[in-house]
Image: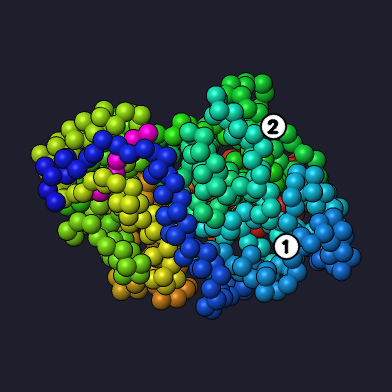
Amino acid sequence: MNFSTLRLCIRRTWAMGGVLRHMDLGCRRRLLPIFSRLLSSPVDPPLTAERYGVSRLSFSEVTAQDVSHFQTLLPGRVVTDEGDLRFHNIDWLKTVRGHSKILLKPRNTEEVSQILKYCNERNLAITPQGGNTGLVGGSVPVFDEILVSTALMDQVISFNDVSGTLVCQAGCILESLNKYLTERGYTMPLDLGAKGSCHIGGNLSTNAGGLRLLRYGSLRGTVLGVEAALPDGSVLNCLNSLRKDNTGYDLKQLFIGSEGTLGIITAVSILCPRKPSAINVAFLGCEDFSRVLQVFRLCKDQLGEVLSACEFLDSECMRMVETHLKLTKPLPESPFYVLVETSGSCAKHDEDKLNAFLETAMDSGCVTTGTVATDHTKILSLWALRERITEALAHDGYVYKYDLSIPIEKLYSLVEELRDRLGSAAQSVVGYGHLGDGNLHLNITAKSHSDALLAALEPFVYEWTSQHNGSISAEHGLGFKKRDHIYYSKSREAVQLMQKIKHMIDPKGIMNPYKTIPAMD
Ligand code: FAD
Ligand code: MLT
Ligand code: ZN
């Protein structure tokens, strides 16, 4: 299809409500493989402690008395069956594995507070867990930490349909919140491929970025309030619904991105935007990465306020989704693809802007081929090519995953350098990500985990990123896997202050030990 035809294809928009209703169904279908991945049972990864040579800290071990205490506190909501615990002990990528003997399912803040108070007194370590979709090994125990799941904390507390402020428990699933809001003319300011499983508390704890950060900004801006249970069992109520509040330190920010190391987030207040009534998606092919950058520049120049996402993938990613998920490439083969989404409140206005953008992109030669979604089914199928790369990679073998912020002009250089450096040692080296946010997802796959390949990747990737003034974790956090690499992105003084804050709030270090903040020297 050429662009003249494409322009004709950008129809007056469809009702967004309809699109999202279908999206929910589509998402559910799409997310089935995520659930089945978690539940399927190929070979379990080795225990984290063995693979990474970690020593257990001197926490107490869970006794029969502890179990019976929890059974009294949470009748019918204490899991001790090894089979049922398996899913919770292994991460989504199947790269780390703990051996917790117990998982607790509180329903409310008071129960979380009681659990923490007891664990603190008994010196029992805890790993908070939401949807267990985290990609840095933060959501599963390293040893036998007690798992505290937010799965039953899934109630909306209030929604103000004038201000758009949603207050809910931490265990609400992101996609369910979006459905709730869609029915009320609003949308979540956050969207990501794991939406059908991840919890809003998990999203805050990792400060997840996702696909619409370009439009709605980071959770550090959209989250208005947080309620959290602290390690001693006290409850910090900062569940504000105010947009403006300059009274002292902004304590909620401590919990956003703290990956369960300071306490358990129990409730969230978040500012939600109006649901856009017009959406278009263009999927474009580019000959090289410099043209990808030109497309992004053009998007900003010409689409301006209606631009809602700008993502990219390379041809290797396309090969992955075609091979492993049987998705169909919508364009002739190109070295790079860019997905551009517009959303707004006036279909005609957005259509005119998109047409003008496509015309310039074609005339300037930065785009060689493309297609535009004209209906919800096609929008979903174009988004799937980008959103499902993570899942396709997991089918390819063992995945070495890097999530880097890099100055945009250098965003793809590391992928090319690594292909040269690794040669046939890697099965595949792919690059994709949030172009609009300067966030590269660099993934390397191999048949299985190998210390030699890891040594070829690290510290090279981190040194390269640091030398280019990037961040070694753009949006996934540090968790277990990246904790000790924090120094590539933060100064010693900054890490020391983090350690002091951690020690002040959690003096016994029971909250998600071995994760995020390196131990004090
Ligand atoms: P979990 O994985 O259960 O936990 C993550 C961390 O938060 C752990 O350290 C855990 O201890 C802690 N935690 C969880 N709940 C709480 C709580 N209530 N209080 C305190 N600590 C808590 N991430 C992005 O940023 N952008 C993306 O686009 C993106 N896409 C993804 C796509 C796929 C297919 C997958 C599998 C993952 C993706 N991720 C992405 C990573 C992951 O989904 C996000 O990090 C998500 O926010 C994690 O939420 P969760 O509920 O699954 O948390
Ligand atoms: C994404 O953007 O697809 C996610 O962050 C997951 C990943 O990095 O694979
Ligand atoms: Zn991402």
Residue 108 visible in the current orientation: yes
> Where residue 391 appears, x then y in whole percent?
42, 63
Name the residue at 22% across, 40% down.
Answer: 10
Which residue does the numbered mark 2 point to in the structure image? Answer: 238
Callout 1 crowding tier (Cα within 10 Å): few <14, some 14–19, many ≥20: many
**What residue range appears in magenta?**
277-284
CA distance for labels 1 and 2: 27 Å
Q: Quadrant of residue 103?
A: bottom right
Q: Is residue 486 above or below residue 363?
A: below
Q: Is residue 454 above or below residue 341?
A: below
Outermost residue toward the right in this view? 65
Q: Quadrant of residue 119?
A: bottom right
Q: Residue 124 shows which numbered tag? A: none
Task: Please name whichever residue, 392 or 7, is drawn nearer the observer in this view of the structure.
Answer: 7
Name the residue at 48% across, 63% down.
Answer: 32
Q: Main secondary structure of the magenta part?
A: strand
Colour setting: rainbow
Task: Please name whichever residue, 447 or 158, is drawn nearer the observer in this view of the structure.
Answer: 158
